[in-house]
Amino acid sequence: MGRGKVVLQRIENKISRQVTFAKRRNGLLKKAYELSILCDAEVALVLFSHAGRLYQFSSSSNMLKTLERYQRYIFASQDAVVPTSDEMQNNYLEYMELKARVEVLQHSQRNLLGEDLAPLKTSELDQLESQVGKTLRQIRSRKTQVLLDELCDLKRKEHMLEDANLTLKRKLDEMEVDTAPPHPPQQQQQLPWQNDHGVAVPSYAPPQPDHFFQALECSPSLQPAFRCMDVNQPPPAWMA
């Protein structure tokens, strides 16, 4: 025999009401779990009994995350108000204005690139030429500034490398001096006529005894004689 139709009304019997709550509560939690698994849905179930006891189920690890998502959705749906006809008209006019500005900017960009120049007049071409020249000067100025900045950076790096090179060279010289074996000072050969400082000094002979020197006696016969020569006579044979 099939189950009869259950009348949806409050069960007056307290015991029957508690038994029915326990059975249907477990079934509801089971159905929520099956729904989250089968349909990959985010399910959150909060249930309070008549006595105030809490029963809950959440497919995610955090129940509060699901509740915050629910609140954001409710508030967003409440704030979404259907615009009136005047607001729609204003939005359409703003859209058309923005569309026209976009078209003008696209046309100006094509002109700057050298395209669609045929319909332009002389004044428009002069204005375009002036604008291009101004832009070109700005680009060159910016390029020069960038090159100068790079040059300053390279010079600063060069100075840093030079300082590092000098430091390494000084350390290398100190290491060579520390590791070099000591050499005895070379004495310069002293010459007989030089003193200890290498300065030339006159040499003096050692003193001689008095008997080394003998006085020369001058004979009166050794007088200088002068002889006259006749210039007309022929020269002697030893002068020929």
Image (cartoon, helix red, strand yellow):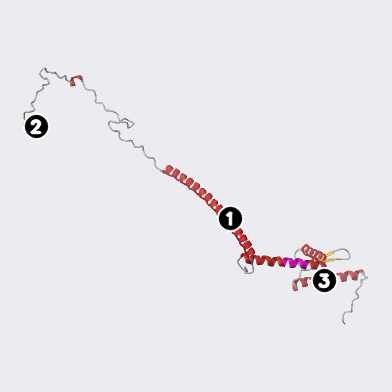
Return the residue at label 1.
Answer: 141
Report helix, strand or loop for mark 2: helix
Three-letter code for the amino acid on which mark 3 is drawn: Leu
* Residue 96 sits in quarter: bottom right
Determine whether 155 is above or below 240 in the image: below
Q: Position of residue 177 (x, y in %)?
A: 42, 42
Q: Where is residue 221 in the image (x, y as percent from the top left)?
A: 10, 18
Q: In this view, does 218 lie to the left or right of 12?
A: left
Report helix, strand or loop for mark 1: helix
Q: Which of 149 and 96 is in front in this view?
A: 96
The C terminus: image quadrant: top left
Three-letter code for the amino acid on which mark 2 is drawn: Met
Three-letter code for the amino acid on which mark 1 is drawn: Ser
The N terminus: image quadrant: bottom right
Q: How far apart are marks 1 and 2 (CA)?
A: 104 Å
Identify which residue is drawn at 88% across, 69% down.
Answer: 18
Mark before the other along the chain sequence, 1 or 2: 1
Residue range highlighted in magenta: 91-99
Return the residue at label 3.
Answer: 28
Q: Distance between the residues labelled 3 and 2?
A: 166 Å
